[in-house]
Image (cartoon, rainbow, N blue to C red):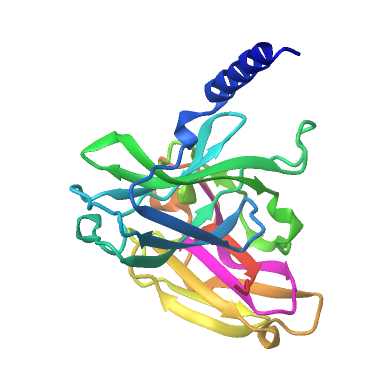
Amino acid sequence: MKLKHFGFLVLILLFLFSCGKKEGDKIADVGVKLSLTLSPETITDFLYLNMNYEYEVSGDFNGFENDYMVFVHFWRIKSKEMLVQDDHFPVKKTVEWKQGDKVTYSRMFFIPKFLDELDIDFEGFEEIKLQVGFYDPKNPGEKIILFSKVLNVQPASINAPDIIFSEGWNEEEMNLAIQDPFYRVWRWTTQKAECIIENPKKKSVLIIKGGVHKSIYQDQTITLQINNQLLEEFISGSVTFDKKYILTPEQMGDEPEFKLTIETNKTFVPSSVNPDNKDNRELGVQIYLLYFREVQVD
């Protein structure tokens, strides 16, 4: 091949590469380097993910005139839709950042269940693009990208213990019009409901998001038990409650499974409260989320 033809070919390849590269993936050079670590390292759906942020402000940093927010966007690559986001202000205002600063903090958020393992086209995972950077809330269209990475997301079933809703549960309900994804799906208990949970025999985290009908009962007591041993008894201060417990192997016992019991001292029947309501179920506590995983060691 003649040299001039070779040079022409190189120019064509460079042109095609530059056209194919997405401008949105370019990391901005603003004198700030973001190191981001995720825990656990294996990312699944239906997962509480801990994100550790470390911003290093270099010696050529010229300062920010605006108080920027941090955008944290998880994009589904195939469908090009936003899966989840966690936009927030950093722990120190960006207008106060100066050369040599190191700004660190951690945040935890929830990746909802979105993978369909029964889909014939499902390949066992899905690639998700994580992008993090800055934007001015007064001008959200312009973004400064500091971090961009493609993540392999697997179904939660690969490492999440099974939870069986055994006794005392009403059928699952759903309202997709509810804005907050945490509260779109729920189950009502009866007076006493039990779950059978696979025992990992290791320290684990149990998270319960629930609700009560405060317009009917102000003093409804909720009792939580693990293997018939009291975990907590409380009266929710609002219509919803969030509980997080670290369970030890001793609490869960030596059997392959253990039992979680949710009990309340007061229930109601909607048709008895409102004659126009034809719902004759016994309703106790509204459960939006039962989350159980082995505690991850960083």
Quarter of the image for the C terminus: give it: bottom right
Drawn side of residue 129 relative to residue 109, left or right: right
Rendered residue at 39%/59% (across/down): 213
**Residue 196 magenta:** yes
Residue 184's spot in the image, x, y percent?
49, 45
Q: Is residue 18 visible?
A: yes
Residue 280's spot in the image, x, y percent?
53, 49
Answer with the quarter of the image where residue 48 lies.
bottom right
Residue 117's spot in the image, x, y percent?
75, 42
Rendered residue at 68%/81% (across/down): 227
**Residue 19 magenta:** no
32 or 170: nearer the eye?
A: 32
Residue 195's spot in the image, x, y percent?
67, 67
Drawn side of residue 275 relative to residue 254, left or right: left
169 or 119: nearer the eye?
A: 119
Rendered residue at 61%/63% (across/down): 40
The residue range painted magenta reads: 184-210
Tell how many labels: 0
Answer with the quarter of the image where residue 54 lies.
bottom left
Quarter of the image for the N terminus: give it: top right
262 or 104: nearer the eye?
A: 104
User: Is the magenta region chiefly helix, strand or loop?
Assistant: strand
